[in-house]
Image: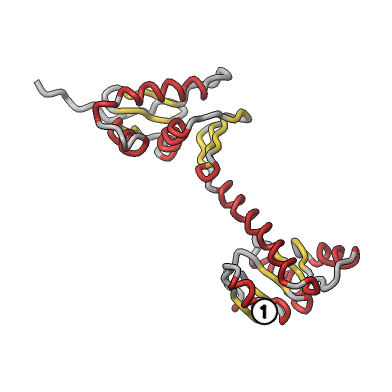
Amino acid sequence: MLLLGAAARALAPRLEASGYGCLQADHQDPSSWGQPDLVVLSAEAAGAIAQLRGQLPAVPLLLDIESDSVMGRSETLSSGAHDFWLSSAGPSDLLMRLRLHTNLVKRAAAHNNRLRLADLSLVPGRQEAWRGQRALALTAREFALLQLLLQKAGAVVSRETILQVVWPDQDSGASNIIEVYVRYLRQKLELGGERRLIHTVRGLGYCLAESLPKNLPKPPLKAR
């Protein structure tokens, strides 16, 4: 977190005690700003907002308006800041707003980590999966299997790998459980008549792809 201005910098000990890493910098020296996740500005640092928006376009900027009023809130928006905080209310007001923006940043990061193939999407951190606009109700094992296949989309995932990742508690003789769960997943993925995405590659494993890739490796020959 970047603190610009005297009132913001004065709160550094309290913010650090609450678990935030703080960088105190000169609001007139852009080279000292670094790459923070959040910026907290005192009123006298408001002039730096335009350059902050240009240099850190995705980072939330919180401006001190000193006293809560319609005029103060309006000035926050017109200055280009994303939100305000009240130095007159003590650290508690800023801490509350920081928690809100920290959660929003985490949600945005989770959204950016979304795995996709065609109209299938999956958010690992939130245990959510979608086929188009339809949410998929998946068990923990189904989700883990789908996530593994989606992480390796376009490649063949062997039964051995699936067992190691999704069923580490099972021995190699339990590979028939994979067929059962692949069937469950196909039923849920194709419930609305959608095209098949999970393909069986005989003798090798399974492949998640829009269509079965060409030039797949040949299965190993069985010993006679």
Q: Decide if residue 107 is on the left or right side of residue 141.
A: right
Please provide percent x and percent y for residue 111: 58, 46
Q: Which residue is drawn at 49% across and 20% down?
A: 187
Label 1 neighbour load within 10 Å: few <14, some 14-19, many 20+: many
Q: In which quarter of the image is residue 142?
A: top left
Please provide percent x and percent y for residue 209: 44, 30
- Front-most of residues 198 and 98: 98
Up/down of 2 relative to 133, above or below: below
Q: Residue furthest top?
A: 193
Location of the C terminus by quadrant is top left
Please provide percent x and percent y for residue 52: 68, 69
Up/down of 39 relative to 126, above or below: below
- Front-most of residues 180 and 219: 180
Q: Which residue is drawn at 31% across and 33% down?
A: 163
Up/down of 114 relative to 105, above or below: above
Q: Decide if residue 168 is on the left or right side of residue 71.
A: left
- The image's colour scheme reads secondary structure
Q: Which residue is drawn at 71% across and 65% down?
A: 61
List the residue tagged with mark 1. Answer: 9
Circle count: 1
Amino acid tagged 1: Arg
Up/down of 144 relative to 177, above or below: below
Q: Residue furthest left?
A: 224
Location of the N terminus by quadrant is bottom right
Please provide percent x and percent y for residue 112: 56, 48
Q: Quadrant of residue 95?
A: bottom right
Q: Residue at x 76, y 69 (%)?
A: 63
Q: Is mark 1 on a helix, strand or loop?
A: helix
